[in-house]
Structure formats: structure tokens, C-alpha cells
Amino acid sequence: MNLFDLAWRNLLRNRRRSLLTLGALAVSAMALVIFGGYVATIISALQTETVRETGHLQIMRKGFLDFGRGNTARYAIRDHAAWIDRIRADAELQPLLRVVTPVLQVQGVAGNFAAGASSTFAGTGWLAADRDEMLAWAGAGLPLPPRANLLRADQPQGGVIGLGLAQLLALCEALELRDCLRPPAEAAPEGAAMAADLGALVQQAGAVAQGRAPASDAVPGIELLSSTSGGAPSVVRMDILRTERQGVRELDVSFVAMPFGLAERLVFGPGGHGASAIVVQLADTAQVPRAQARLQALLASHPGGADLEVRPYTEVQPQYLQVVGMFEAMFRFVALLMGAVTLFSVANAVGMSVGERVGEIGTLRSLGFRRGHVRRMFILEGVLIGVLGAVVGVLIGVVFSEYVINRAGWSWTPPGRVMPVPVGVDVFGHPALFLGTVLALAGLAALSSLLPANRAARMQIVEALRHV
């Protein structure tokens, strides 16, 4: 009779204790699979949102991330169109690319001067068609609906502002916003006449720059003030297509999304061109290292590329890795708790089995079983119950995830967002989670069986046979 048969029969000898231990391990495995799948889903959703917002890679001037916000024109890429053409024409990059588009960051003062209201803003200029493509990316494998792009290619003057900024600029009534708070009534602000004159001047300047008639009051809009690359004041009028509430209050009161051409005119003046960065979105996130290496080689092989660098989305949005690290730490903490449950449950079961079978151990030793045989028999007993409990728990976790959690219709609103997202557990997308759970619990079961198994192996034959 081999050791496996002996270990299996010993499990069946006390079925109640074996079932209780197996149940504890099954609960641990189920918790690891469900929570691990949930964390994987959260990370995939976060990656999807980050890549939709910033792309996989961004080409920018060296130092832009540290100083570019304070001096957009100084760190701008003036020949971005030529670089975009080179990237799209590269034979090695073509199969990897999805979107290559410029983006322009701009800061300044937004004003509704007719109402005597103004506030600082942080704006981003996009090409509407490319922005549509970026927001539809779903390369992380989750069936997340594409985000709506509020910019329109047929509205070169139209942009989007945060709801908080609309409140600060007293635009609630003009935009007919229902959930917009109106400031209390007060006397006419000082300098109202000057503000009205400045507003008229801004509208006229925008009309001249575009070659069209001054904007009508029927179209709600704001005036954006900044400085050009030469330091001269620059003003444009932006029609408001829509407001969009942002998940972070500081962003909501300063958010402006505008057409790329309007941002260029605000930063560089009429006829000026430039971009803060060139955004590269790939079809597959796994190709980021390859695409980054090729882009760096492309920059090094052309004049003017030495002053540029390629940054991945994890550096452009450093909070991505922070959030991923937080959820991974939570998973490790849960895994530690489940591991403790496994250790104590198996150690207790094997220890009680050793105490009940002292006479049997003496008989086996007298029949020629060595100490190592006895030790391996009890360790194998613990491993068997660990593997069985882990497999049962994994199966229950998969069924519960697919047929209960994923079909319950639960949702939650993540930090920094205003729209709820569905609660899901992506277990089939991460098969390594199954194997890792089974192997980890089996290993912990073997480890917890080692102490009682050593105690059984060290028993003296005569003393064991005298035990009643």
C-alpha cells in the first residue's frame, strides 16, 4: 500500500473533521478568486480610462512634465505635424498604432464679462475626430461603453466646461442647467462697464481672427484670456456646447476642453502652430515597450529629435500606479488573512489526526516504515485536503462570480468620477489566478502539516505501541 492510499483513507476516516477543514480552505480559495477577479477588473477599468484620456505614449519636449504647465509656448512642439506624419509612415509602428494626435495644454483666465464674473481655467485642446477614436478604445478587454466626446468637428469655436466653472461664471441660467447653483444676488460688481467693454473687444477680436461676424448673444459663451508665446495678451471667445461635471472639485471649477485650433490661436496667436505633446494610442497595451523603443529610435534618427522624449501613460498619469498599488496591497492583505486561515485549519486537522493515530504510527514503524515515510504521509494528507479545498473553492468562486455578482446589476462610483460603473469580477480573463490560488493553498497546507508530521516521525516505536 503506497503513501497516497494511506493519506486518502486517513482523510475518509474522520469525514466530519475533513469536511470542516475542506470547507475552511474552500472559503479561503473562493475569497481569493472573487476578490482577485474584482481587483483585476478594477485595474483593467482604470487602465482603460487612463489610456482613453492620455493615450499609451506621449512625445513631448524634455522638461515639459515639470515646467510645461507654467510656460506652454516654451515647451511646445512647433513641427508636430511633420512628426505625426513620420510616426504614421513608419513601417514598424504602423501595425501597432491606433491614434496619433496632437494635444495642447493652456492656462489662463475664463470670463463671463457681461456678468462681471471670471475665474482661472486649465484647458486642453483636442482634434475632435481623433478624440472620438481615443475615447472608444477598449483594449483592456472589458466591455466598457465608449465615453462620449463632447467636442464637435463642425463647431471649431465650441468647447466644454466643468459644471463648477459654469457656476463660478454665473452661466446657470444662460445654459439652462438644472443642478447648477446660482450665487446670491448682489449689487452690480465694480468695473462692470470695463468688463462689458473688454467682453465686446474679445468678441470682436475673435470675429476678426476667424473672418466671421461677432458672436450673437443667443449662443452662450465665455472669453478665454492667456498670453502668446511672445508674452502679449491673447483673448478668444469660446461657445459653450455643454457642461460636464468632473469627479474632482478642483478640476470641476477649472475644466475647459476646446478645439485644437482654438487652443493654438490662444497660445500662439493667429496663424501660430504648436502642440504640448503628440499622443500615441496603440491597439494593445502589451506593445507599449516595443512602440516606445521604436519611437525613441525614430526621434534619435531625425534632426530636432534630441530635444524630445517619449513618456508612457504611467508617467504622464502617475496616480495610475498609485491606485494599482493600493488595490494590489489590499489583495495581498486579504491573501494574508486567507493564508492564516489555511495554516491554522490544516495544522489543527493534521495535529488531531496524529494524536488519534499514535498506535498506528508505532505499528507502521515496526513494519519497516522509516521516519521519512511517516512524515511524508502526514504532509501528503495535508496537501490533499489543501488541493481539494482550493479546487472546490475556485469552482464555487467562478460560479458565484459569473452567475451572481456579474448578473446582479450592482454599480459604484469610483473616486474622481461622477458616473457609476458596474461591479464585475473578471475571473476567466486571468487564468493564472486559478492556478496561483490552488498552488498557494496547497503549499500553505504542506507547510502547516510539517510540524505535526515531524512530531509523528520522531515518535519512539516502543512508546507508540504502548499508547492506548
Image: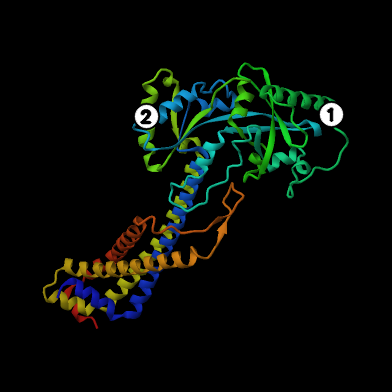
Whole-number angstrom distance, CA of label 2 to CA of label 1: 55 Å
**Nearer the observer, 345 or 302:** 302
Residue holding disc 2:
90
Check disc 2 and give the amino acid type. Answer: Asp
- In the picture as drawn, the residue positioned furthest to the left comes out as 368
Residue 320: % across, % down: 49, 43
Q: Quadrant of the C terminus?
A: bottom left
Q: Position of residue 257 (x, y in %)?
A: 62, 36
Q: Earlier in the sequence, mark 2 or mark 1?
A: 2
Q: Residue 355 sits in which quadrant?
A: bottom left
Residue 189 seen:
yes
Residue 192 disc label: 1
- Image quadrant where one finds the N terminus: bottom left
Can you see residue 62?
no
Q: Which residue is pictured at 59% across the width and 28% down the height? A: 261
Q: Residue at x 67, y 24 (%)?
A: 210
Which element type, helix, strand or loop, lies under badge 2?
loop
Mark 1 Cα within 10 Å, few/some/many (few <14, many 20+)? Answer: some
User: Above or below — where is 130 with respect to 13?
Assistant: above
Residue type at mark 1 is Ala
Q: Quadrant of residue 232?
A: top right
Position of 368 compared to 304: left or right? Answer: left
